[in-house]
Image: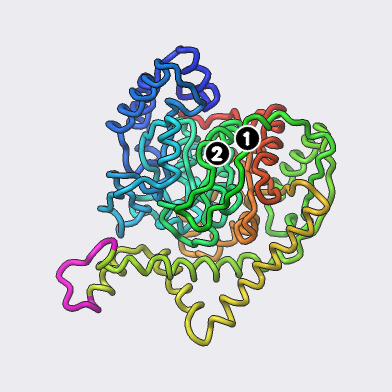
Amino acid sequence: MHHMTLAEIARGLADKKFSSVELTQTLLARIAQLDPQINSFISLTQDLALSQAQAADTRRANGESGALLGAPIAHKDLFCTQGIRTSCGSKMLDNFKAPYDATVVAKLAAAGTVTLGKTNMDEFAMGSANESSWYGAVKNPWNLEHVPGGSSGGSAAAVAARLLPAATATDTGGSIRQPAAFTNLTGLKPTYGRVSRWGMIAYASSLDQGGPLARTAEDCAILLQGMAGFDPNDSTSIDEPVPDYSAGLNGSLQGLRIGVPKEYFSAGLDPRIAELIHTSVKELEKLGAVIKEISLPNMQHAIPAYYVIAPAEASSNLSRFDGVRFGYRCENPANLEDMYKRSRGEGFGSEVQRRIMVGAYALSAGYYDAYYLKAQKIRRLVKNDFMAAFKEVDIILGPTTPNPAWKLGAKSSDPVAEYLEDVYTITANLAGLPGLSMPAGFVDGLPVGVQLLAPYFQEGRLLNVAHQYQLNTDWHTRTPTGF
């Protein structure tokens, strides 16, 4: 059962080939057996999972149906879950049990999903390797000596290792798409505002967006259907109708205009990945797509702009964790100032502290105009590039990452080298556009992803292209040895 996709599980449950309880018990046993190798979970919720599975079986017995009814998933450990630890991968929140469910958690629970646990992540979603978690690094099931990508590496590793069919994740600068590429999954970052951020612990509020991680585009469509929608509790949520994503998967790609930016194929891109991307382009041409070279001239400025804006917002968002209002408090403080300093110094890891300091500096008097304001102007230029490009093409295609997954610890002493791995993904966050990564092949036995970007609220178009590609390729069906 662990090799079944969400879509196959839905059909199996509907046909009464197995029950949700049986499936849940199988996957919980598999997690207990295999997760110690990869460290993808922070918390397991066996009792909750079995009670939700029993409730789902009862609902089906009473005539209810639904693609997610009885389907096992896990949540990235920054989605608040009532009465369950929500740690954000940090010592700062190790003892925090949320008093309410995030909107994403509540919507998926109402649809009948079964929560197996909370997945490991880079601390406060800051990282591209899932090595900054206070609970230890997550390992890539394709090669346990390599990173799974971050910050949603726990969700990605768990799905890739067939511990569960799908999981929730979040993407601030590529944290859904990059782990998807590194672990041979399909990952979708929706349009900013498409999925509610209420109850999702913030890193950078103008960039964060929740989305699905799964093995196929079909599964991402199913999970996104349960996650998306307007939320009055979230001031950044967009009141836009949610289409039936599954119904649009089988549309023809005949005449679809796909743009390939020339800036993507620079010296920083591994030539073996470039070759796989060109192979993917040819596959889509066979399906009727029309390929056109385009330009995104301001892409070169995206990384410096992002690494001013994101830390600036993080320094503001994380100011609440001070030992008084929220989070870890140091022992026996000498005075109030000592409590602030030691609580934050002991509660936050080095990467979080680094970004808080960078952000506070960028927002400080005398530097705001030079750094933060200029970065926001660059952000607008990046968006304008995309708006111009989408007048010529329907989809933009390119690599998800410049390199395959690196070895654990290889970039730990050089944060900038790790930041540069986000070069292809962060532009979608700066502009608020939807983006998807799908499996496109292997380099040295490690998965490679191809990225698709679309205009606002065109997630259905991304899923349609990815699904048609996956009907004609088999990269997404490959399973890591030992799992």
* Image quarter hosting the N terminus: top left
Residue 184 x, y percent position in the rendering: 57, 38
Residues at marks 1 and 2 touching, judged by CB atoms closer than 8 Å: yes
Q: In this rendering, is residue 46 above or below 241?
A: above
Answer few, some or many: residues within 10 Å of disc 1's Cα (few below 14, many 20 plus, some between 14 and 19): many
From the top left corner, tell me how far across and down residue 231 is, in percent.
Answer: 49, 49
Residue at image point 39% right, 21% down: 59
Whether residue 341 appears in this view of the structure is yes
Q: Secondary structure at mark 1?
A: loop
* 394 sits to left or right of 323: right
Q: Residue furthest bottom?
A: 366
Q: At label 1, which amino acid type do we have?
A: Tyr
Residue 391 spot, x, y in % from top left: 81, 54
Residue that label 2 marks: 224
Residue density around tag 2, few if under 14, some if 14–19, many if 20 or more, within 10 Å = many
Location of residue 268 (image quadrant): bottom right
Magenta stretch contains residue 336: yes
Ranked by sequence position, the earlier of labels 1 and 2 is 2
Which residues, given as a range, are shown in magenta?
Answer: 326-338
Residue 140 among those drawn in magenta: no
At 60% from the left and 69% from the top, the residue drawn is: 304
Mark 2 is on which residue type? Leu
Q: Which residue is mark 1?
A: 245
Q: Position of residue 41 (x, y in %)?
A: 37, 41
Residue at position x 68%, y 41% from top? 462
